[in-house]
Image (spheres, helix red, strand yellow):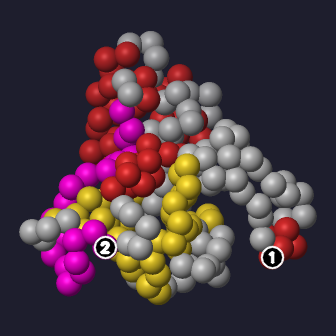
Amino acid sequence: MSIRHIATAAAIAALLGSFSLANAQSDNERMEMLRGGASKKGVYNIFGLDGTGLGRTTVRYPSKYAPGTIVVDTTARWLYLIEGNGSALRYGIGVGRSGFQWKGTHKITAKKVNPSWTPPPEMIARQPDVPRHMKGGDPENPLGTHALYLGSTLYRIHGSPDADSVGEAESSGCFRMRNTDVADLYKRVPVGTTVVVK
């Protein structure tokens, strides 16, 4: 957690008077307030602020890749959409947990709004209680509101009903984004876009 986030949280808490971090019910709740947990009513979210620094932003990003290319940095947990003039749109992402991370280059082969989800047999073997199918639009659907399919793999860039998982390494190899961010990326990139995973 950065000093800036702590200072911001403390300043906001001071403005709220009796409602402050000290009133949080547990250490976990206080941590959620400080990191701006999107599914919790923390200090940041009272004002509609994210507090995580994971939202879309334009950054300097000199690269060898053509404008329109997506570059996924799994170590830093950022996705970059390359623009011209050495800049990129940067989005926070969740990545595969240990043993499920990968690298390579693929094209976006399909795009879907409100995608349905069926777990692969490997996931069912690991998690026997996982639902066998979820319809698109279901608020619990792990693909969220939009999905970009990568090559002929089972991997996707997709939204998530759990915005707090963005920035974490928890997936089975897909790249999770907040639903607002994946919707923004979805409208910016066509089928055929190159995706470089590093």
Q: Is residue 108 left or right of residue 165?
A: left
Residue 122: percent from left, percent from top: 80, 76
Task: Check disc 2: other Cα within 10 Å, few if <14, some if 14-19, many if 20+.
Answer: some
Relative to residue 145, is residue 77 depicted above or below?
Answer: below
Answer yes or no: is residue 36 visible. yes
Answer yes or no: is residue 76 visible. no
Q: Nearer the viewer, residue 5 or 166?
A: 166
How far apart are labels 1 and 2 at the CA level? 30 Å
Secondary structure of the residue carrying tag 2 is loop
Residue under label 2: 69
Residue at image location 44% in from the left, 85% down from the top: 105
Is residue 56 covered in magenta? yes
Residue under label 1: 122
Residue 56: percent from left, percent from top: 32, 50
Q: Is residue 125 left or right of residue 118?
A: right
Mark 1 / mark 2, whichever is N-terminal: 2
Secondary structure of the residue carrying tag 1 is helix
Where does the C terminus fall, quadrant-wise? Answer: bottom left
Between disc 1 and disc 2, the foreground one is 2
Residue 39: percent from left, percent from top: 56, 36
Amino acid type, mark 2 = Thr
Residue at image location 20% in from the left, 65% down from the top: 83
Write down the region rendered in magenta: 49-69
Amino acid type, mark 1 = Glu
